[in-house]
Image: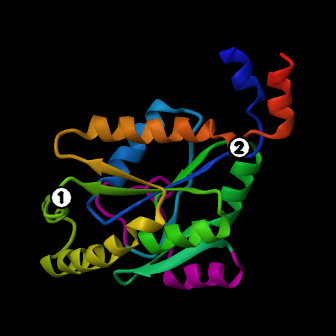
Amino acid sequence: MSGNCHAVVVGPGLLFVVSGPSGAGKDTLVDALRNRIPRLRYSVSATTRPARAGERDGEAYFFVSREEFERRIATNAFLEYREYNGYLYGTPRDFVERTLTDGYDLIVKPEVNGALSIKSAFPDAVLIFLLPDKFSHLRGRLLERRTETIEEIARRLEIAHVEMNHIRSFDYIVINEQRRQAQAVDDLEAITRAERFRIHRWGDDSIKELEHS
């Protein structure tokens, strides 16, 4: 019976949006989830911020100038875009739409306002808010990066307090506990699997096929 279930679940891919305050661990957890689910595609965002040590263009982000970013805005090339901490970030529209149409599940990790904009454009998107088990851990994680000044970190924490006000606009919350990242990845994986089997994603033809199998 389980084989038939997998056979009849067809249609567009699902869009998973992982967001939350800077320092919550989005990059690490999403990378780990993608290693577990090879078919899960990832949408690389564009940004005007400089690359950090070890970041490669086209992997962490597409690093572009502000002028190039604004040119893409003018041509409606972004599904959503926002300015965050002085830099522009955007989700390329074409890749998202093409990947979902081809039937692949897709994960993106924009900042919180960007996540809400994606939900407006794709009401069926699954929004996941990621948090550490203690808000105070955000500062420690940002300091451990050693990529920003104390002033920049303070600004990120101010933004994080504002972002917390949007938790109830999300579908799920995942807690990334200190030294228990594997559990948070388990939780993310459970969400992606459960969403695939929600009743409203099954068309009438699929249900009829099950009834007559």
Mark 1: which secondary structure?
helix
Find disc 1 in the rendering and name its residue. 141
* In the depicted structure, whether residue 52 falls above or below residue 15: below
Left or right: 13 as drawn, with respect to 133: right
- Residue 196 percent location from the top left of the image: 62, 38
The residue wearing badge 2 is 201
Which quarter of the figure is the C terminus placed in? Answer: top right
Q: Is residue 166 left or right of residue 97?
A: left
Left or right of 124 on screen, residue 16:
left
Asked whether 75 falls inside the magenta stretch, the response is: yes
Q: Which residues are magenta?
A: 50-76
Residue type of the residue flagged with mark 2: Arg
- Counting from the top left corner in percent of width and height, residue 134 is at 16, 58
Amino acid of disc 1: Arg
Q: Residues within 10 Å of mark 1 (few under 14, many from 20)?
A: some
Q: Is residue 40 left or right of residue 148?
A: right
Q: Callout 2: few (<14), some (14-19), or many (20+) C-alpha neighbours within 10 Å?
A: some
Residue 86 lies in quadrant: bottom left
